[in-house]
Amino acid sequence: MSSARRTDRQPAAPHVADSHDLIRVHGARENNLRDVSIEIPKRRLTVFTGVSGSGKSSLVFNTIAAESQRLINETYSAFVQGFMPTLARPEVDVLDGLTTAIIVDQQRMGADPRSTVGTATDANAMLRILFSRLGDPHIGPPSAYSFNTASVRASGAITVERGNKKAVKATYERTGGMCTNCEGRGKVSDIDLSQLYDDSKSLSEGAFTIPGWKSDSQWTVQVYAQSGFVDPDKPIREYTEKELRDFLYGEPVKVKVSGVNLTYEGLIPKIQKSFLSKDKEAMQPHIRAFVERAVTFTTCPECDGTRLSEGARSSRIGKTSIADACAMEIRDLAEWVRTLDDPSVAPLLTALRDTLDSFVEIGLGYLSLDRPAGTLSGGEAQRVKMIRHLGSSLTDTTYVFDEPTIGLHPHDIQRMNDLLLRLRDKGNTVLVVEHKPETIAIADHVVDLGPGAGTEGGTVCFEGTVEGLRAGDTVTGRHLDDRSSLKETVREPTGTLEIRDATTHNLQGVDVDVPLGVLCVVTGVAGSGKSSLIHGSVPAGADVVSVDQSPIKGSRRSNPATYTGLLDPIRKAFAKANGVKPALFSANSEGACPTCNGAGVIYTDLAMMAGVATPCEDCEGKRFQASVLEYRLGGRDISEVLSMSVAQAEEFFGTGEARTPAAHKILDRLADVGLGYLTLGQPLTTLSGGERQRLKLATHMGDKGGVYVLDEPTTGLHLADVEQLLGLLDRLVDAGKSVIVIEHHQAVMAHADWIIDLGPGAGHDGGRIVFEGTPADLVADRSTLTGEHLAAYVGA
C-alpha cells in the first residue's frame, strides 16, 4: 500500500472563493435609513438593536432580505415571475455578498377558519397518509381524512376528441373528510333574531334594531314595508308562516318602492351580505358590537367540533382516530407515534416523529394540531414557521428573525437562544432583530441603530461586540444592564373582579380574584393559560378596554391621523376657519388630487417586474388639489399639517389661532405612548411592529373604560422605552383605572402591585394558579419559575 506524499512544505494560499466572508451594505436609504453602510460577518449571529422605529427592520428586512429574495426571483423565467409577488429593488447603492435569505417574521398566520396548526405545517398531511395506509376500516385515500376536502360524486357522458368522436359514459367519485354540516369549520353560526328586530312592534312602528335602519326614511326599511310580502302595520310576532318565511328568507326579487325599482330579499341573507361578509376589525365600533351580539358561533353538533365526517372519525389505528390524534397535545402525539412500528410506512413515521419533536424542542409541545392558526400569538406563529428549518440540511443560507423571543417567558428564552446558535453552528448567517438583553448577549456581532426613532434615527450608532456595546455611549449600551427594583409600597385594591371555575382551553377550574384599582400583572410560561384566563373570563363589556396583539389593518392611504380619528377635528377646524366643507380636507374624498386620486404617487404596473411609483407631478406628492392648499389654518395648509410630527402638531394645535382641544387631546395621547416623532401623514404600512402596538394603545386610551386589559404591551419596545411605558401604566392607575397586563418582561413584573402567576408548565401541565401576591412576596417565595427569574433580575 502506498500513499501520496506532499512535496511542498509551504502552506497553501487561501482560495479566492473563501474571501467572500462579509455581507456589505453601502448607501442604504430605505424608509428612514440615512446612507447606512455596514459590513456583516457571514456564518455568525448578528443582532440588530435600537429604539423602536430606528430603522432595524428597514435595514434587515426591507433591504438585505428583500434584495436577496428579489435576486432569487429573477433567476426564474418571465412566465414563472408573472405568478410571483413583484419586489422593487431597495433604495441602496451596493449590496454585496448576499446569500439566500429565509425570512421567519412575526406575521400572523392567516385567520382562515379552515387553517390549523396541522395544515400550516406538514404534520396534518403526513397524518392523513398514515391513516389512509393503516386506518381500520380503510375508507379511502389521504383526502378522505381531510376536513378541507368535500366528497364529490358525478356521472354523465363525456366526448373523447380522438379519431371517431364518441360519447362515453363516465363516473367520477372523490372521497373527502369534510363534515357536511359545518363545511370543515368545526363551528356553525346562528343569527339571534331578537337582536335584529323587536317582534312586538310592526315595521311602521320601528321594529328593526339594526344600526342605521330607521323606519321613516331609510330605503332598506321601506323596501320591506312596501314590498307587499308583509303587512307593515302588523306586529312581526303575528306574521303567518308564509309571511315570516318571505320576511326572513325571501329570494331576491324586484319591487317598486315609491316609484323606484329596488331589490327585495329576506332579512337573513341581507344581514349576511351587509355585515357578516365584511372584516369585523374594519367595522365602526357600534357596528362591530351589533355583529358580536347578533351572531353566535356554536360547536358543530354533528362532528363535535372535529371538522371531520363520520367516516373519517370511524377509521382508527388501534383505538385512536385522526380526530383524536389532532386533539392531543403535540408532545403526547409524538409519544403515540413512537408506539407505531410498521415497516410499510417506516420513512413516513420517521419524518412525522422529526416534525413533532421539532414542535416540542421549540417549546410548542403544548399546542394541538387542531388549534386554529388564527388564534396563535405573534411569537407562537413565528416559532411554528421555524419548525421546517430546524432539521434542514441547508448551509450557507441567511436566516432572518424578527424578535424571536416575543411571547416567551424568561425560562423559555434560553431554549430559543440555543436554537439560534445551532443554526449558526451549521454554517449559516443568522440575522436577528431583537430588544431582549438575554439574546443580545449571545451575539457574535451587534449593530445598534439610532440614536432616536423616525427622522431622528436611521444611522449606525455602534457596530462591534457585545462588550463594546456595553462600554459604548449609545442608548442601547446605557440601558443594556438596566434592572428595575421592587416597589417599596404597593397600591391597595379598590375592589376585585371575581373569576370562578374558569375552564377555557387548558384552564383547570381556576378560581381567582383579580384586584381592581391597581396594576395587576398576569404571568407564566408560554402556554400556561394567561390569555385564556383574562380574555376568556374578563367580560369584554362597555367598561373593559382590551388592547390585544391583533395587527393594525391599513393600506398606504391610512396614517396615524386617520387611524386615531385625529383628522376629523383637524378637517372641521380647517372648514370652520375658511367657511368651506370638511370633505375638502380629505385626500380620500373631495379634496383629493384628481391625477393621483389622493395617493400622492402614480403607480405603474410592469407585470412580472416591480411596479414603479413616481411622485404625482400635479400635486407634487402633496395629495390635495391646488385650490384646497390655498385654505390655511394658523398660517399652514392641510398638507403642511400632515407633514408635522406629533410633537410639532401638539404645539401647533395647543395655542393660538389653530387651537383645537379635540385634536390636542389625541396628540397628547400619542406623545404619552412615545410616538412624538411620528409624522401625522406617514402611511401605516411603514410603521414598525412596536409603533403599531403603541398607536393602538394611544387610540384605546380615549375609550371610556374602567378596566384596561393589555396583552404584552412591551412587544417591540426598546429597553429605554419600557420605562416610559411603566410611567404611562402608572398614570392610568392613578387616574382611577384598573390595569391588567399579560406580560413576561421582568421590569413590568417588578413594577406591579399584584402578580398572578400561572403554571407550573404549559398545556395540560399548566392552567393552574401557582402564585398570587405582591412582587416582593414572589421573589421571597421563589417557588415558581417566574419567582426564580424575577429574583435573579432584581438581584435579590
Image (spheres, helix red, strand yellow):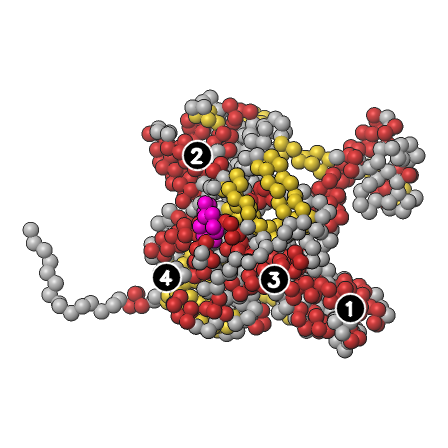
- Specify the label residue 727 is tagged with: 3
Marks 2/1: CA–CA distance: 60 Å
Magenta-drawn segment:
779-790
Foreground residue among 560 and 486: 486
Identify residue for label 2: 332
x and y percentages locating residue 489 in the rendered image? 58, 57
Residue beneath the point at 88% across and 40% down: 206
Q: Residue 242's quadrant in the figure?
A: top right
Disc with the residue nearer the chain's start (4 vs 3)? 4
- Could you tell me the amino acid type at mark 2? Asp
Q: Which mark is residue 44?
A: 4
Q: Which mark is nearer the camera, 2 or 4?
A: 2
Which quarter shows the C terminus? bottom left
Q: Position of residue 87 (x, y in %)?
A: 53, 60
Q: Amino acid at mark 4?
A: Arg
Task: State how far apart marks 2 and 4 are (Cα).
Answer: 36 Å
**Structural crowding at the residue carrying mark 1, measured as other residues with C-alpha within 10 Å and reported as few (<14), some (14–19) or many (≥20):** some
On the question of residue 166 being in view, the answer is no
Residue 42 numbered mark, or none: none
